[in-house]
Image (tube, rainbow, N blue to C red):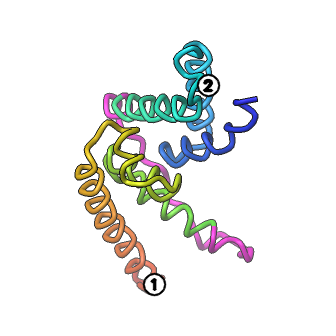
Amino acid sequence: MFVEGSSTALLRTAYLLTGDRGHAEDLLQTALLRTARHWPRARDSPQAYARTVLLNLSRDRVRALFRRPREAPMPPDVDTLHAVDAGYEQVSERRVVLRALAELPIRQRQVIVLRFFEDMSVEQTAGLLGFSSGTVKSHTSRALARLRELLADHDSLQEVPRAHR
């Protein structure tokens, strides 16, 4: 019952933390298995327990990513697109936000995901991450400032005529 009722919300959290659906699904599966394995401990608040496991797994994943060579995705060739769907702009904006979110340090990303996507209070976020309220506030402030910079950089690139790119 817990898995059926909570998987969608936990998958969204995992996706926002990783930026990749496949990794998010892997993280969620591992988090659910660990929650089940420690059910006597998790029984009182299984969603909070699973979310904590997700946060820890996302930290571990980021650490592992820094240990191996970085991958550089090939840029999409926009000129080869024949037609643009009405939803393309929304998908494009979503990708820009996800890329900007992925640029944040893991702790800042976790705070932003919990505060704004999971709609948690400062105190709830602090409790879940083991931070003080002041640390959550400072991480939020720094993360939002960095996101503004990253998104402003993207907007300024969009204003440049194609011939000059």
Q: Is 157 drawn above or below residue 112 in the view shown?
A: below
- Residue 24, image x, y percentages: 57, 38
Determine if the magenta segment contains residue 32.
no
Residue nearest the observer in this picture, 149 or 56:
56
Q: Earlier in the sequence, mark 1 or mark 2?
A: 2
- Residue 31 lies, in percent from the top left, at 56, 26
Tag 2 residue: 32
**Residue 57 horizontal/vertical position (percent):** 45, 29
Q: Is residue 129 above or below residue 152?
A: above
Q: Position of residue 50 (x, y in %)?
A: 55, 30
Q: Quadrant of the N terminus?
A: top right
Q: Which residue is pictured at 41% across the width and 60% down the height? A: 100
- Mark 1 residue type: Ala
| Magenta portion: prevailing SS class | loop
Amino acid at dot 2? Leu
Residue range highlighted in magenta = 64-90
Image quadrant where residue 164 sits: bottom left
Q: How many marks?
A: 2
Q: Residues within 10 Å of mark 2 (few under 14, many from 20)?
A: many
Q: Which element type, helix, strand or loop, lies under badge 2?
A: helix
Quick one: quadrant of the C terminus? bottom left
> Dot 1 corresponds to which residue?
163
Residue at 57% across / 21% down in the picture? Answer: 35
